[in-house]
């Protein structure tokens, strides 16, 4: 079959690559053998790119060290690989498929030529199902970090806790989260010991620029990739000699730089040094999800700082409070705020809070509330979360689809299953057109009480109302 005809028959942005496995086990440069018409845009990404011919070095068009690592691994091990990353605000699904036996020698009997097909799909929005493709150990690490990240009441403490968790995941000697506010051009530097602005000033001084300019230089060093995972500093020496000099001064031998973006807005970087290079693939998968979770937390903090709306935030759980919910609903009813085309409403009532308060004390109850709120933030971080009462939370999801609302609730229930001390009674409503938001909230509330009744039917020992009657 003709190569081009074969590529045109593939759904998605398809390209075929080849490289040689040399006698000493090293790899040659990667060659681009062909692209289908859907993917011809890659040939014109660089205005100075040469005319394509089968076998042209792929770096004439693009350079992404992580892509190269996946391609080499897939081709040399004869294993199909999958990646799902946020690159400059777009969610990219990459499928790496070896199409030629790496053990088959070429004519010279020594060099083995490998062919690998790469299929790319991209979308503006996150797909929950695509994120779930990661391994169980990666998913566990992310769940643990998410809970720690969201249950912290103080932003600085949350960043420090996240830096500590990532440091352990990477087996790194040093790790930090470098936040970037593009509106104010302000940056902050957090490690596992907390906020370290003096270190930030020292570091930026060594690079002979401001902290915000450091962030812009890092973004340039990424060269359109979402991250750098470097076993040595050769790439840094080539791309930014002054940064390389600064790293050498601090005995940095290898480096991770992972951008944190909320949609297409840069809000920070994950930075780790002298990490365990044997865990490279696991680290990348984990940091892909970590960056996504951190992005929402950082941008939320920046928005709160910009708008100075701390009076509308529940101090314990760091979600919107009842006053904020009432203001939002009143604005929708009065017409001061435009009614979204659709609205999903979720009522989530925390089961067993009174029992925890009575038996273990109110400090334990507060911790339970914070953990419960963290699960809601993980699931509904892109929407409006309110603490409506002592143990009751309300989530408003404007412009959501009915299917996505069901999917989000399913994800919340799955998180509850893996968090034994948190249990929610959940009720939902979905409305479109000229709807009454108050009636939708009443419907969700009624459905929540039905769910709670079923919970107590299955767990009669936890029904405080029954105990009060006996």
Image (spheres, grey):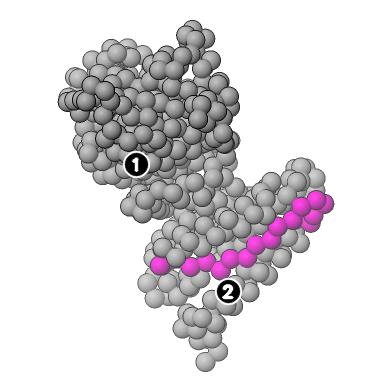
Measure the C-alpha gap from mark 2 to mark 1.
Answer: 47 Å
Assess disc 2: are there few (<14), some (14-19) or many (≥20) residues with their C-alpha within 10 Å of its C-alpha. many
Q: Nearer the viewer, residue 207 or 117?
A: 117
Q: Is residue 200 magenta?
A: no
| Above or below for 143 versus 355 | above
Q: Could you tell me if residue 19 is visible in this image?
A: yes
Q: Secondary structure at mark 1?
A: loop
Query: To which residue does mark 2 refer?
Result: 452
Residue under the point 71% across and 65% down? 443
- Camera-side mark, 2 or 1: 1
Q: Position of residue 89 (x, y in %)?
A: 52, 31
Residue range (magenta): 419-437
Q: Nearer the viewer, residue 426 or 239?
A: 239
Q: Residue 227: x and y, percent?
A: 38, 29
Which residue corresponds to mark 1?
79
The x, y position of residue 337, in whole percent, is 75, 43
């Amino acid at each position: 079959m003709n190569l081009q005809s074969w590529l045109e028959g593939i759904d998605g942005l398809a390209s075929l690559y080849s490289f040689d496995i040399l006698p000493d086990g090293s790899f040659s440069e990667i060659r681009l053998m062909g692209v289908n018409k859907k993917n011809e845009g890659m040939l014109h990404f660089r205005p100075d790119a040469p005319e394509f011919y089968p076998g042209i070095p792929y770096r004439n068009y693009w350079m992404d060290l992580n892509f190269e690592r996946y391609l080499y691994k897939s081709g040399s091990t004869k294993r199909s690989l999958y990646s799902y990353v946020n690159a400059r605000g777009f969610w990219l699904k990459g499928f790496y498929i070896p199409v030629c036996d790496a053990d088959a020698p070429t004519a010279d009997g020594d060099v083995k030529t490998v062919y690998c097909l790469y299929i790319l799909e991209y979308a503006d929005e996150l797909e929950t199902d695509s994120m779930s493709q990661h391994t169980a150990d990666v998913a566990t690490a992310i769940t643990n970090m998410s809970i720690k990240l969201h249950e912290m009441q103080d932003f600085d403490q949350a960043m420090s806790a996240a830096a500590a968790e990532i440091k352990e995941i990477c087996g790194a000697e040093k790790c930090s989260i470098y936040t970037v506010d593009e509106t104010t051009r302000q940056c902050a530097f957090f490690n596992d010991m907390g906020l370290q602005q003096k270190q930030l000033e020292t570091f930026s001084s060594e690079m002979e620029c401001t902290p915000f300019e450091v962030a812009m230089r890092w973004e340039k060093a990424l060269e359109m990739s979402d991250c750098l995972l470097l076993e040595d500093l050769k790439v840094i020496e080539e791309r930014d000699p002054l940064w390389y000099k600064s790293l050498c001064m601090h005995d940095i031998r290898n480096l991770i730089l992972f951008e944190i973006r909320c949609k297409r807005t840069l809000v920070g970087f994950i930075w780790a040094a002298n990490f365990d290079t044997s865990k490279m693939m696991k680290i990348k998968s984990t940091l892909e999800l970590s960056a996504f979770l951190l992005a929402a937390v950082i941008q939320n903090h920046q928005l709160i700082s910009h708008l100075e709306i701390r009076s509308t935030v529940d101090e314990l759980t760091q979600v919107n409070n009842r006053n904020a919910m009432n203001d939002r609903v009143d604005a929708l009813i009065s017409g001061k705020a435009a009614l979204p085309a659709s609205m999903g409403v979720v009522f989530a009532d925390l089961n067993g809070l009174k029992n925890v308060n009575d038996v273990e004390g109110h400090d334990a109850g507060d911790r339970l509330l914070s953990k419960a709120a963290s699960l809601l933030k993980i699931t509904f971080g892109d929407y409006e979360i309110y603490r409506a009462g002592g143990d009751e939370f309300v989530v408003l999801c404007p412009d959501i689809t009915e299917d996505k609302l069901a999917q989000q609730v399913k994800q919340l229930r799955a998180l509850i299953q893996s968090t034994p001390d948190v249990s929610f009674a959940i009720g939902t409503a979905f409305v479109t057109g000229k709807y009454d938001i108050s009636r939708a909230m009443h419907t969700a509330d009624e459905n929540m009480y039905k769910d709670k009744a079923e919970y107590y039917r299955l767990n009669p020992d936890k029904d405080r109302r029954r105990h009060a009657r006996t």
